[in-house]
Image: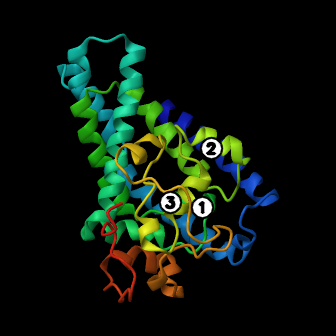
Amino acid sequence: MDQTVLFRLAVFATLLLVMGTWEAILPYRRGEGQARAGRWLTNFALMICGAALSRFTTGAAMIIAASYAQARGWGLLPLLHLPAPVAVLLAIIGLDCAVYWQHRFTHMFDVLWRFHRVHHVDPGFDISTAVRFHPLEIAISAAYKACFVVILGADAWAVVIYETLLSSFAVFNHGNVQLPRLLDQALRGLFVTPNMHRVHHSAVMDETNSNYGNILSVWDRVFASYREKTREDDRDMMIGLIEFRDSESQSLAGSLFLPFRREPARGNQQEPGKSGS
């Protein structure tokens, strides 16, 4: 196995263990432990399905794209002839902006939302939610990011660093934990925190359609999608999607088939992306 893959897996596994221990000892939402075994089985099974698919399809798409573009001098960054550390930093920032918009697009367009809603169907919010994605969404995401790697002319090492940060922040941001208020406020001036991202998993759709950031919180502020907090106390608010709380939607088979199911009526709930956030 490639050493960069081993490095990313080691960082991911270590953070998963640390965050899992933290939320087990000091959970922010006490009720998340209920029926956790079933949720975790589905969520981590989806992770394995996604890893298996990407292994044989788009697994190395970003690295291949970076090497291909670099060999030909393609992209915006090579034109600037910047010192390597600066170019790497700008590539990471540029990729994070692109992934912010990718996330926002999944809430704006129905065909993308059908796959992304697999992530939001989870009725709980903890580290396992961070890996709950439909395998086809993972493949689409890899292709999308590979395109921006070429546009930016990102170095392969910038891609490795960004992908490591992205998976690490995903685990951190989905942790059922709370940072001290002052620390949370200080961090979320630049980075996404669990309290900030928890808003995005509210069952209220105009709250779901906010706080799309992955690593940097500045994109939500710049593009007017930032929401400070939920209307309801987030310790007690409903997580997930109201229309998909049945046992079928929570199973592995149901999750894989979910994008192709007819969507139940939402009643007074807003469609994804219709809130203007």
Question: Which circle's residue, 3 or 2, is located before the other in the chain?
Answer: 3
| Element type at mark 3 | helix
Q: Secondary structure at mark 1?
A: helix
With 183 as the anchor, is 7 left or right in this view? left
Nearer to us in this view, 25 or 12: 25
Q: Give the CA separation, mark 1 to mark 3.
A: 12 Å
Give the amino acid at mark 3. Answer: Ile
Mark 2 Cα shell of 10 Å, populated few (<14), some (14-19), many (≥20)? some
The residue shown at (32%, 61%) is 106
CB under 8 Å between callouts 3 and 2? Answer: no
What separation in Å lies between label 1 and label 2 (alpha carbons)?
25 Å
Which color scheme is applied?
rainbow
Query: Left of 130 or right of it: where is 110?
Result: left
Q: Nearer the viewer, residue 22 or 59?
A: 22
Query: Residue 26 appears at what percent x and percent y?
Result: 80, 57
Q: Residues within 10 Å of mark 1 (few under 14, many from 20)?
A: many
The correct choice, above or below, for 213 with respect to 81 in the image is: below
Which residue was labeled with disc 1?
Answer: 128
Quadrant containing the C terminus is bottom left
Three-letter amino acid code at disc 1?
Answer: Ser
The residue that mark 3 highlights is 48
Q: Residue at x 53, y 66 (%)?
A: 45
Disc number placed over residue 153 in the picture, else none:
none
Q: Please name whichever residue, 140 or 224, is drawn nearer the observer in this view of the structure.
A: 224
Answer few, some or many: residues within 10 Å of disc 3's Cα (few below 14, many 20 plus, some between 14 and 19). Answer: some
